[in-house]
Amino acid sequence: MNCPKCSSKFEQISFGEIEVERCLGCQGLWFDMLEKEDLVKIAGSETIDIGDDQVGDEYDSLQDIRCPHCTVKMLPMVDKDQVHIKYESCPICYGTFFDAGEFRDLKEHTILERFTQMLGTLRTNF
Ligand SMILES: [Zn+2]
Ligand SMILES: [Zn+2]
């Protein structure tokens, strides 16, 4: 499988029981259906996103891409909680592509949110 953005090869990396694809060129991440949702809940999973934010930003503008599995045009998506995170999703296999740094960004927000919720719980308990 080749990267839909820079055409480099993907390498398979695993985190726990979840296997994801990371591009050897732009270091974008490919997640099969629901892998991202599972992975974002696991502590430390942001370490799979080793890419440079700047490289990620460059490739972020490239949205006219095709799914490496199905070859159909992928749909540009925006994260509902963090609208600056733009990713692409395949309408057939539901795979998603995240540019370098975007998964880290998504994850940071998730942790912060949990922390705020925790503080909220503490406050109501005291
Ligand atoms: Zn790439
Ligand atoms: Zn697909």
Image (cartoon, rainbow, N blue to C red):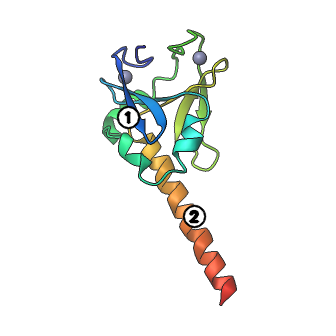
Along the horizontal axis of the image, is 46 left or right of 93? left
User: Of 116 and 40, which appears nearest the observer?
Assistant: 40
User: Of 61 and 42, which appears nearest the observer?
Assistant: 42
When the figure is inspected, residue 79 is found, relative to residue 62, above or below; the finding is: below
User: Badge 1: few (under 14), some or many (20 or more) residues near its Cα, within 10 Å?
Assistant: some
Q: Residue 78, percent across and down?
A: 60, 38
Residue pictured at 59% horizontal, 14% vertical: 73
Q: Residue 79, percent across and down?
A: 60, 42
Residue pictured at 36% horizontal, 46% vertical: 47
The quadrant of the picture occupied by the N terminus is: top left
- Ligand 1 is found in the corner quadrant, namely top left
The quadrant of the picture occupied by the C terminus is: bottom right
Nearest to N terminus: mark 2 or mark 1: 1
When the figure is inspected, residue 8 is found, relative to residue 114, above or below; the finding is: above
Q: In the picture, residue 12 is in which quadrant?
A: top left
**Residue 59 visible somewhere in the drawing:** yes
**Looking at the rendered structure, which numbered label has been put on residue 103?**
none
Q: Secondary structure at mark 2?
A: helix
User: Badge 2: few (under 14), some or many (20 or more) residues near its Cα, within 10 Å?
Assistant: few
Q: Residue furthest right?
A: 124
Residue pictured at 52% horizontal, 41% vertical: 85
Along the horizontal axis of the image, is 47 left or right of 112? left
Q: In the picture, residue 20 is in which quadrant?
A: top left
Q: Residue 95, percent across and down?
A: 57, 25
Q: Residue 82, percent across and down?
A: 57, 48
What's the amino acid at mark 1?
Gly
Along the horizontal axis of the image, is 23 left or right of 35? left
What's the amino acid at mark 2?
Arg
Which residue is denoted by mark 2 in the rendering? 114
Q: Nearer the viewer, mark 2 or mark 1?
A: 2
Which residue is denoted by mark 1 in the rendering? 56
When the figure is inspected, residue 86 is found, relative to residue 40, above or below; the finding is: above
